[in-house]
Image (cartoon, rainbow, N blue to C red):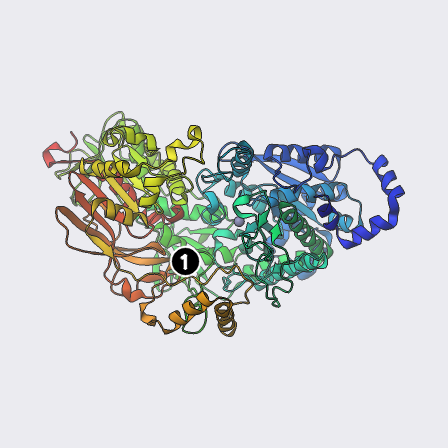
């Protein structure tokens, strides 16, 4: 493993070191203070087979470098979800670090260049230094990058080569050593704990407490602490001009991906940023290939569509993604091609993959080497062209601040169904540094009247690109593998229109208008004064998803809650009726103030029959180890204060009905997973027996749970599981999804039409199976195609069904490669369709092929099964907790299933 550190030195530095000779090296060593190398500090060479530096020691080492050299500043800037240190390093020349605040001031001025002349911008670009933000290991099983940065920082801190000096003198490096420190603990600690045992070495559960691998899909909703720290305390605070996001991919493709990305790119991304990505990516490729590192690819299957993983490109920064081949499940151990002797990865050279990898083995040391070279090459390039980078940073923001391409603005009318949702949506935009205005009196725009208090978000502002991509409808391009052929799958989802996700009405104003506006500096929910304590009850409408925070708080305080079973006296079906007591008053008043809930008082109990919520309704969340939808749901239930627990295999020893009122099956919960669970032989019982399978006996017990009165909620692919468990009278309405043609593991050109044909043929001829598949797809009836990889689709709701209480008659739901259902005859199961797809205009935002298959089909369906209740959600109405408008469908069912019917006379008692 000694060889790799030599190979990672850039050629120039190597030549200089050789020219200087051993004597010079000796004197430099004696003159400088003794700074431990990573190998000395950790006791092994970074990248040695099987060895990983643990996160707390990594921070200790950085902290030591900060003490022993004047080029590194180290600080812990916050605590993570699980209470670990979240750290930031600043690395530059001592001179630059001394004027750090001035350099940040320059970045901030260039990021909001309104009022700045070109000459002033040029002068600032000359005075400033480009900030290069790099973060390693957001995905914790991608272990090599967190190791590579040790070598990177050590070299920056100690090396005196012209190569390193140029980086230090001409740029400022901001480094987040791990964007998910909790995962460093979980994955690496598990790696050592299982050493020499029969146990699986890869951590079997989510490596972020709630969101696992989805931790880089959170960059527009900002739900997790780590996302928020990065944006608030790094991105928005220092305004870096470039972000380098270090990842690893599977072991069988190219050895490293660098930008440029493939199509599509969100047209809201400034072309200078797309070009900046390509420029730095190609500088990295040159350095790697120059060092004879094989298997470098660009223009592979990574696209630039969803803001969920690229906050920075809407904030003036190119996103540099590097994806180094990993050892897969071997983590820190070498990966060897199962076909011994055959080189890893594609073997045909292409212009975007000029040198195939020639060996059958791939080690952690190589992964570290590739990471070090790529990171230093990116930094070096930015340092060389600092003025150009800062000046382009200015030009991107200048262009957006003067945007005249329209729309002029997005208008959020003051009158909304859900003020809490409106507040949450505006808070997201504000958190992303978007400027929000509020009308101080009524105005007209687009031929419509808007009341005073309506919000206006203009697109002509420095971060107008973020506002526009979040508030407009996405028109995803119809990308095919070849013309008329199967769809080219996106890298992730295709629709993210924020107001649809959240249940807020937003209008787009194409033309400029005048309105009396004031800048909003801290958004708050619009609140109405709570009524004085009424004689009988508080009434709260069912429209806001925020109301369930109130319901959970009332349940926690053992305050009874009722719901109206039908509309009455101007109040909607599902209205919450909360008897007015000294116990309920402070809870209701606080919720009204915090959440913007509209509360009215009733001096007489309403004359309406309805339901009494079960006191202390207890939810069991079936969260199989490693199941991300379950992790997201756990976060959601915690945020709302819902009384819940993760269902454990041990629970099946007792009476499930005694323990839970509701069991929630997230998408991804298959029958096989319920029966088998985690491998008992390879996962230690002390830690993992909760996630073991429950077998056929447990499966039967789950069925009995519902028949005896329990409530079962099944989401996404778990609908199939629930259907089989309870013999629910529904069946799939959609044809099987077409075979996926990517994201490719082979080097592939950009999917322009011509290139796609070429690629499809090339791929087809590379394997007989693939050829047959391609031919089959070509002759297949194109009308049999259904494809919807993450879009917002219209649903019509039955607002008289308790599951849809509070929903508008129609609103988009999220659909990610999910299913729609049709009813079939069933005996002894009472079935009601809660929501279905309309006959036309189903696609609202994103991409959908085969819309006709959805027409009139059911999405959410409720069932009475024995004494129990079940609801199936064919589409992922909780997807990554982003479609908040449809949270109600889950919360409603959760509390309705266990509730008891009451007559009008019993209401409030
Ligand atoms: Zn990754």
State the image coordinates of residue 877 (x, y, percent, origin top left): 33, 49
Residue pointed to by mark 1: 495
Query: Does residue 85 show up?
Result: yes
Judged from the image, the secondary structure of the residue bearing numbered disc 1 is loop
State the image coordinates of residue 36 (x, y, percent, origin top left): 74, 34
Q: Is mark 1 within 8 Å of ligand 1?
A: no
Quadrant in the rendering for residue 639: top left
Q: Quadrant of the C terminus?
A: top left
Asked if 150 appears above or below 467 in the picture, the reply is above
In the foreground, 375 or 196: 196
Quadrant in the rendering for residue 271: bottom right
Q: Quadrant of the N terminus?
A: top right
State the image coordinates of residue 645 (x, y, percent, origin top left): 34, 32
In the foreground, 472 or 622: 622
For residue 330, side relative to residue 604 (left or right): right
Name the residue at 75% across, 36% down.
Answer: 69
State the image coordinates of residue 143 (x, y, percent, origin top left): 58, 43
Query: Does residue 601 show up?
Result: no
Asked if 380 appears above or below 91 in the picture, the reply is below
- Disc 1 packing (10 Å; few <14; some 14–19; many ≥20): many
In the foreground, 683 or 858: 683
For residue 34, side relative to residue 523 (left or right): right
For residue 431, side relative to residue 442 (left or right): right
């Amino acid at each position: 493993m000694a060889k790799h550190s030599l190979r990672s030195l850039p050629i120039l530095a190597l030549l200089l070191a050789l020219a200087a000779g051993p004597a010079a090296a000796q004197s430099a060593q004696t003159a400088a203070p003794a700074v431990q190398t990573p190998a000395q500090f950790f006791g092994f060479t970074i990248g040695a087979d099987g060895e990983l530096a643990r996160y707390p020691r990594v921070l200790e080492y950085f902290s030591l470098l900060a003490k022993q050299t004047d080029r590194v500043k180290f600080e812990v800037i916050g605590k993570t979800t699980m209470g670990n240190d979240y750290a930031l390093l600043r690395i530059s020349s001592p001179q630059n670090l001394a004027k750090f605040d001035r350099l940040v001031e320059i970045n901030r001025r260039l990021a909001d260049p309104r009022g700045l002349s070109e000459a002033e911008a040029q002068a600032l670009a000359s005075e400033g230094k480009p900030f290069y933000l790099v973060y390693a290991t957001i995905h914790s099983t991608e272990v090599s990058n967190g190791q590579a940065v040790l070598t990177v920082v050590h070299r920056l801190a100690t090396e005196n080569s012209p190569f390193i000096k140029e980086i230090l003198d001409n740029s400022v490096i901001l480094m987040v050593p791990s964007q998910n420190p909790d995962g460093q603990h979980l994955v690496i600690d598990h790696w050592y704990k299982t050493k020499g045992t029969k146990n699986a070495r890869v951590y079997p559960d989510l490596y972020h407490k709630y969101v696992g691998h989805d931790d880089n899909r959170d960059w527009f909703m900002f739900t997790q602490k780590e996302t928020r720290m990065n944006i608030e305390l790094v991105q928005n605070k220092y305004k870096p001009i470039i972000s380098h996001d270090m990842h690893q991919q599977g072991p069988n493709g190219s050895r490293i991906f660098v930008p440029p990305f493939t199509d599509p790119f969100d047209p809201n991304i400034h072309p200078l940023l797309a070009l900046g990505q390509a420029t730095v990516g190609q500088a990295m490729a040159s350095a790697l290939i120059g060092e004879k590192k094989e298997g470098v690819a660009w223009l592979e299957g990574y696209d630039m569509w969803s803001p969920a993983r690229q906050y920075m490109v809407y904030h003036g920064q190119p996103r540099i993604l590097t994806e180094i081949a990993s050892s897969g499940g071997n983590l820190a151990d070498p990966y060897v091609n199962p076909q011994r002797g055959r080189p890893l990865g594609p073997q045909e050279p292409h212009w975007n993959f000029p040198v195939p990898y020639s060996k059958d083995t791939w080690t952690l040391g190589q992964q570290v080497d590739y990471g070090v070279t790529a990171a230093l090459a990116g930094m070096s390039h930015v340092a060389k062209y600092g003025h150009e980078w800062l000046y382009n940073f200015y030009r991107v923001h200048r262009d957006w601040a003067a945007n005249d391409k329209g729309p002029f603005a997005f208008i959020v009318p003051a009158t909304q169904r859900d003020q809490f949702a409106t507040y949450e949506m505006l808070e997201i935009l504000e958190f992303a540094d978007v400027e929000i205005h509020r009308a101080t009196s009524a105005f007209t725009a687009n031929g419509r009247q808007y009341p005073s208090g309506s919000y206006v978000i203009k697109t002509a502002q420095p971060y107008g690109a973020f506002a526009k991509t979040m508030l407009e409808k996405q028109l995803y391009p119809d990308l095919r593998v070849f013309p008329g052929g199967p769809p080219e799958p996106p890298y992730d989802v295709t629709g993210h229109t924020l107001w649809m996700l959240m249940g807020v009405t937003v209008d787009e104003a194409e033309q400029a208008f005048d309105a009396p506006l004031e800048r909003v500096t801290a958004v708050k929910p619009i609140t109405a004064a709570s009524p004085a304590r009424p004689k009988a009850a508080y009434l709260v409408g069912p429209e806001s998803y925020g109301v369930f925070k109130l319901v959970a708080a009332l349940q926690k305080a053992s305050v009874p809650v009722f719901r109206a079973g039908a509309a009455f006296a101007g109040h909607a079906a599902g209205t919450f009726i909360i008897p007015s007591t000294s116990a309920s008053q402070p809870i209701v008043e606080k919720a009204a103030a915090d959440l913007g809930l509209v509360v009215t008082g009733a001096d007489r109990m309403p004359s309406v029959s309805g339901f009494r919520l079960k006191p202390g309704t207890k939810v069991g969340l079936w969260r199989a180890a490693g199941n991300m939808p379950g992790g997201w749901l756990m976060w959601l239930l915690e945020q709302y204060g819902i009384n819940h627990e993760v269902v454990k295999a041990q629970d099946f020893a007792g009476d499930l009905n005694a323990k839970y009122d509701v069991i929630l099956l997230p998408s991804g919960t298959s029958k096989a997973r319920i029966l088998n669970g985690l491998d008992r032989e390879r996962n230690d019982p002390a830690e993992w027996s909760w996630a073991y399978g429950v077998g056929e006996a447990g499966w039967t017990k789950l069925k009995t749970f519902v028949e005896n009165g329990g409530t079962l909620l099944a989401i996404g692919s778990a609908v199939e599981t629930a259907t089989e468990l309870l013999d629910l009278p529904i069946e799939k309405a959609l044809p099987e999804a077409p075979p996926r043609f990517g994201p490719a593991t082979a080097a592939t050109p950009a999917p322009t039409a011509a290139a796609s044909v070429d690629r499809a043929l090339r791929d087809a001829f590379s394997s007989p199976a693939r050829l047959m598949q391609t031919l089959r797809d070509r002759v297949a009836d194109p009308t049999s195609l259904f494809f919807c990889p993450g879009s917002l689709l219209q649903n019509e709701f039955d607002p008289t069904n308790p599951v849809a209480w509070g929903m508008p008659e129609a609103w988009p739901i999220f659909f990610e490669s999910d299913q729609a259902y049709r009813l079939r005859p069933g005996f002894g199961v009472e079935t009601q369709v809660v929501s279905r797809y309309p006959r036309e205009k189903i696609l609202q935002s994103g991409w959908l092929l085969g819309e006709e298959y959805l027409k009139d089909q059911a999405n959410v369906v409720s069932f009475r099964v024995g004494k129990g209740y079940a609801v199936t959600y064919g589409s992922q109405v909780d997807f990554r907790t982003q479609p908040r408008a449809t949270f109600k469908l889950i919360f409603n069912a959760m509390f309705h299933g266990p509730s008891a019917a009451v007559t009008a006379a019993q209401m409030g008692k």
